[in-house]
Image (cartoon, rainbow, N blue to C red):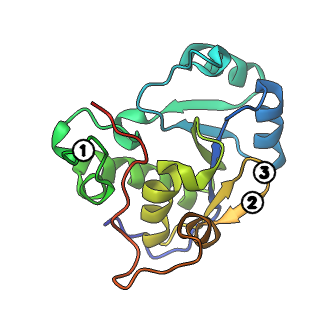
Amino acid sequence: MILMKNRAPQTPIYTIGYGSRALDAFIETLRKYGAQYLADVRSAPYSRYKPEFSKEPLEQALRREGLHYVYMGAELGGMPKDRSYYYANGKVNYDLVQEAEFYQKGIARLADASERGLPTAAMCSEAKPEMCHRSKLIGKSLTEAGVETLHIDENGSLLTQEQVMKRLTGGQGSLFGEGGFQSRKRYR
């Protein structure tokens, strides 16, 4: 696991899902929390349902607003290309992904952004953070690395990683600690 350097993080890493938000409302939410960098953590940065959130139009819209777009789906996406990160049922095994070198490099980039004081939000499509790898994988890793992680929920409110985990588990802790998370969808 990536460990932070000796100094404390200067700024939290936010996560956000666009869900049913309009692009203008999405950008307004980023501005509300001061995010200047958007790390797109979708494995496939395209949307049939919300084409304005596909990579190229989104990047252009953010640039017009003075915001920066960074594609990080190859490192931090929720659907790795390598099938060895999947269970037999087609769901992604986040514990395996968390140990992968490509993933560790992505987490290190986000941790570095935090240390450097770069206001960054990691984005995926799912509006509810508890339903997305942003919390079950990325938020978990960042928190373990000592990086404050705040999730912007479907209503535009901030939740800590702990609050999102309580939403996910219904407040029921595991006898063996957190972990064992997997994608909620099956991918074939």
**Residue 1 figure quarter:** bottom left
Question: Number of numbered discs present?
Answer: 3
Q: Which of the 4 image quadrants contains residue 38? A: top right
Give the residue drawn at x 36%, y 69%: 179
Question: What is the CA distance from the residue labelled 2 to the residue labelled 3?
Answer: 9 Å
Which amino acid type is marked by label 3?
A: Tyr
- How far from the left and from the top, in percent, is residue 49? 62, 18
Q: Which mark is residue 158?
A: 2
Instruction: Residue type at mark 1: give it.
Output: Asn
Measured from the top left, where is residue 114 in percent x and y? 56, 58
Which mark is in front, 3 or 1? 1
Q: Residue at x 55, y 68 (%)?
A: 165
Q: Nearer the viewer, residue 143 or 155?
A: 155
Q: For this view, does 103 lie left or right of residue 40?
A: left
- Dot 2 or dot 3, earlier in sequence: 3
What crowding class fits label 3: few (fewer than 14 Cα within 10 Å), some (14-19), or many (20 or more)? some
**115 and 61: which is toward the camera:** 61
Eye-nearest disc, 2 or 3? 2
Q: Is residue 121 toward the left or the right of residue 83 in the image?
A: right
The residue lying toward the viewer, choosing from 187 and 140, is 187
Which structural element holds mark 3?
Answer: loop
Q: Which circle's residue, 2 or 1, is located before the other in the chain? A: 1
Q: Amino acid at mark 2?
A: Leu
Which residue sits furthest front? 89
What residue is disc 1 on?
89
The answer to whether mark 2 and mark 3 are in CB contact below 8 A is: yes
Instruction: Check disc 3 and report the residue beneath it.
Output: 33
CA separation in Å, label 2 and label 1:
33 Å
Eyeballing the image, is 36 above or below 107?
A: above
